[in-house]
Image (tube, grey):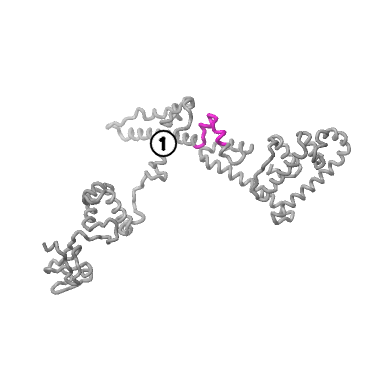
């Protein structure tokens, strides 16, 4: 009955019912943890006497602020359970601790206090020597989910599946690469009377088969990465037009065809990045040449470049007019008849002789030509100054007319060849 009542420290008279230290050599000597740690002595009791820890079961190891209010008795049962059942068997551990604790509470308390808490930080080193490598991690290990998870099937119709011999649920084809690879292991069997040479020979057959499977899968991955199946079916043209941010030139198309053997060593994204960087390099080199030309002509600010370009165009136009002045006299009569369709239209007097020939051959009115020319030159100057612009050409200008006018302006020196 005495154990059921309150207990007090014989030295400081503090209540020690939850936890106390009892001397095994002196009668009725019980000390609180503070007095015991300070080495308190009273009467015949000495600090070097033997002692016994008396726990009422209500003492908390982590303090009253810890979540869940786990008592020292429950902590001891938890440590016994983790040693007996092993980490992860939370249901058996909860049954061992008591009915008052659920498996979720047992798991959260152990992980938070003994692993991620101060005790775990002090006992578990950051780098564990000779630690077993987890090959199932998602970082590209041999058994990682990124490698073992099958790819989604191709998005093709049933008729196209039959044409290719494709089985979507297995992601296989009726005729695979190295179709007879399975014959290497189809007749293998392990016998108890096999000697070492026969075992090594069978292992070599299995290794050869695994290599063939890896090569087969590698080819499938390349076909999937570069969309070779949609290309074979003629489906990738519209998708390429949507994804490409710029128009591919004829030279780049030829270079892509020449570098096709490198597909097996580079991913599709790496291959596209290569050509994108090559295009950026080309544009930068052209910009550098333009800036060097400006510098040679004494231009040090971008604001002065527009004036310089306008002056250069005027000089070239004067040279052009002088060169055509002689031929103009001899052909004036013939040209009057040639320009009869447009000579009475507004804006005719603003055109040069070559522009009149161009408008007459294109059957384009002078006013419309001047409008298109102004828009193209303005966009060109804004791009050279680094100002983003969106060209808004008239609706009556089709691709043929635009190309003819661009070629004419380039040959006349109004715009550079890079812009055209």
In the displayed image of the protein, which residue is found farthest to the bottom? Answer: 43
* Rendering coords of residue 213 (x, y %): 42, 34
Q: Callout 1 environment at 10 Å: few (<14), some (14 to 19), or many (20+)?
A: few
Q: Is residue 236 inside the magenta stretch?
A: yes
Q: 146 or 127, which lies in front?
A: 146
Instruction: Say what secondary structure mark 1 lies in.
Output: loop
Left or right for 318, reference 387: right
Total numbered badges shown on the rendered structure: 1
Q: Is residue 159 above or below residue 408?
A: above
Left or right for 269, reference 396: left
* Rendering coords of residue 140 (x, y %): 42, 44
Q: Is residue 97 inside the magenta stretch?
A: no
Q: 188 or 215, which lies in front?
A: 215
Q: Is residue 112 above or below residue 5?
A: above
Q: Based on the displayed image, in which of its 4 quarters is residue 64 positioned?
A: bottom left
* Rendering coords of residue 345 (x, y %): 80, 37
* Rendering coords of residue 247 (x, y %): 62, 39
The magenta stretch is 225-240
Which residue lies at the image location 69% right of the left edge and 52% below the top edge?
291
Which residue lies at the image location 73% right of the left edge and 44% below the top edge?
374
For the N terminus, the quadrant is bottom left
Q: Main secondary structure of the magenta part?
A: helix
Which residue is label 1 attached to? Answer: 150
Q: 282 or 387, which lies in front?
A: 387
Which residue lies at the image location 47% right of the left edge and 32% below the top edge?
155
């Amino acid at each position: 009955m005495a154990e059921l009542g309150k207990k007090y420290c014989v030295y400081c008279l503090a209540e020690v019912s939850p936890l106390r230290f009892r001397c095994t050599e002196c009668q009725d000597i019980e000390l609180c943890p503070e007095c015991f740690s300070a080495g308190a002595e009273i009467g015949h009791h000495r600090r070097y006497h033997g002692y016994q820890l008396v726990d009422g079961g209500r003492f908390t190891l982590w303090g009253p602020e810890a979540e869940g209010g786990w008592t020292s008795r429950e902590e001891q049962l938890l440590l016994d359970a983790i040693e007996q059942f092993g980490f992860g068997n939370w249901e058996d551990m909860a049954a061992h601790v008591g009915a008052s604790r659920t498996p979720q509470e047992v798991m959260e308390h152990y992980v938070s206090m003994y692993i991620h808490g101060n005790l775990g930080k002090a006992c578990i080193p950051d780098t564990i020597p000779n630690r077993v490598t987890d090959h199932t991690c998602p970082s590209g290990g041999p058994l990682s989910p990124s490698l073992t998870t099958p790819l989604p099937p191709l998005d093709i119709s049933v008729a196209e599946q039959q044409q290719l011999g494709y089985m979507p649920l297995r992601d296989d084809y009726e005729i695979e690469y190295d179709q007879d690879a399975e014959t290497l292991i189809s007749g293998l069997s392990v016998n108890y009377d096999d000697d070492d040479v026969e075992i090594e020979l069978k292992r070599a057959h299995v290794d050869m088969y695994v290599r063939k499977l890896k090569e087969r899968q590698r080819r499938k991955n390349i076909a999937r990465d570069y969309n070779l199946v949609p290309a074979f079916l003629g489906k990738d043209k519209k998708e390429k037009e949507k994804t490409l941010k710029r128009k591919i030139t004829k030279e780049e198309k030829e270079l892509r065809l020449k570098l096709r053997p490198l597909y097996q060593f580079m991913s599709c994204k790496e291959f596209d990045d290569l050509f994108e960087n090559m295009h950026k390099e080309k544009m930068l080199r052209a910009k550098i040449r333009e800036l060097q030309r400006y510098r040679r002509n004494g231009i040090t600010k971008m604001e002065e470049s527009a004036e310089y370009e306008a002056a250069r165009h005027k000089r070239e136009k004067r040279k052009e007019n002088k060169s055509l002045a002689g031929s103009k006299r001899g052909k004036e009569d013939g040209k009057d008849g040639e320009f009869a369709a447009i000579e009475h239209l507004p804006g005719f007097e603003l055109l040069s002789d070559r522009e009149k020939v161009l408008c007459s051959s294109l059957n384009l009115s002078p006013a419309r030509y001047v409008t298109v020319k102004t828009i193209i030159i303005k966009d060109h100057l804004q791009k050279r100054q680094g100002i983003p612009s969106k060209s808004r050409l008239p609706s009556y200008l089709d691709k043929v007319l635009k190309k003819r006018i661009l070629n004419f302006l380039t040959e006349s020196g109004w715009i550079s060849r890079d812009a055209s």
